[in-house]
Amino acid sequence: MTLGFGSTKIQVSTSLLGVNLQLRVSAKGLLTTMNSNVLSNQPTRRIIPAACAAALAMACVVSLPAHAVKVTPPPVPDNLKVLDGTHPFLVGHAIGTQNYVCVPSTTTNSGVAYVLFTPEATLFNDDGDQLITHFFSPNPDPRDPNRSAAVVADGAIRATWVSSRDGSSVWAKLHVNDKGVSGSFTPDQTAVAWLLLDKVGVEDGLTGGNILSKTTQVQRLSTTGGVAPGPGHGCDSPSDLGHTAFVDYTADYFFYTDQ
């Protein structure tokens, strides 16, 4: 970044990669304040030191670690509690759909049922800035191969989150503890379950960004909507096979790390 004051220019080089977006917003706010100050009719000898101090302050802000912004999840039952020694470093507020397809079923009288084939959501921070996209995709980690004959893919199909800022990604699956209890809790029957998911694959972004590739676990909490449609909504008989339903939902996703 170059700050210009008549014939004087100050070069400030900072990188926002790997910094929590909350901090980036703070940095932008500081820059706006700084610019409004230096445009006033101050003597040049006062402008330059003030600009240097503001630029240095901005550099300090954007160099803070991503988890410097406090992230506080709501209380959760024991089966949704994360690993000891980890902490939340990022929260994203999701708006999107849970997408279902009508398939054969042996558990319904109609012989068909809606099953989830992917979520499709965008996660935002508290200021409305886009953070992450969320969907299902094959896990590129060879330790988690595809084992479904109904799917053509090298890796298992997993919940996926991709950073909109640096392209880093994490794949996760539902947590199951050593007693066989899954990380799923449904406090509201009209909303999709709260979940705890374990990382099964990560990738840095193309330029080495690691916002999400340091993730160890993910919680989906405070959900609304997203439940599969009931009878009378397009999946009631074998003639409805292949029908799809896109159901609006919201959720808060908390990302944890041991770093």
Image (cartoon, rainbow, N blue to C red):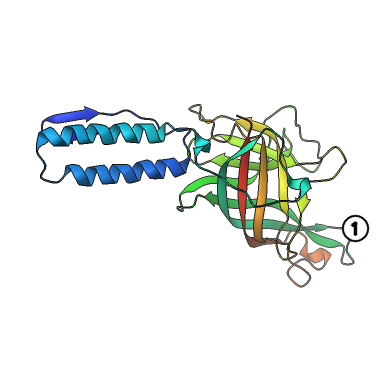
In front here: 61 or 94?
61
Residue 145 at x, y percent in the picture = 76, 32
Residue at x-position 11% and y-position 33%: 45
Residue 5 in sight: no
Residue at x-position 77% and y-position 50%: 184
Q: How crowded is mark 1: few (under 14 residues within 10 Å), some or many (20 or more)?
A: few
Q: Which residue is most to the bottom?
A: 232
Residue 230 at x, y percent in the picture = 77, 68
Residue at x-position 69% and y-position 29%: 141
Q: In which quarter of the image is residue 258?
A: top right
Q: Quadrant of residue 228?
A: bottom right
- Mark 1 = which residue? 106
Q: In the rendered view, tell whether residue 155 sits above or below residue 183.
A: above
Residue 134 in sight: yes
Report the side of 60 relative to 54 (left or right).
Answer: right
Q: In the rendered view, tell whether residue 58 sits above or below residue 108.
A: above
Q: In the rendered view, tell whether residue 18 sits above or below residue 90.
A: above
The residue tagged with tag 1: helix, strand or loop?
Answer: loop
Q: In which quarter of the image is the C terminus?
A: top right
Report the side of 29 relative to 160 (left or right).
Answer: left
Residue 102 at x, y percent in the picture = 76, 59
Report the amino acid beneath label 1: Thr
Q: Quadrant of residue 190?
A: bottom right
Q: In the rendered view, tell whether residue 26 sits above or below residue 105.
A: above
Residue 187 at x, y percent in the picture = 74, 60
Residue at x-position 10% and y-position 45%: 41
Report the side of 164 relative to 51 (left or right).
Answer: right
In front here: 176 or 143?
176
Q: In which quarter of the image is the N terminus?
A: top left
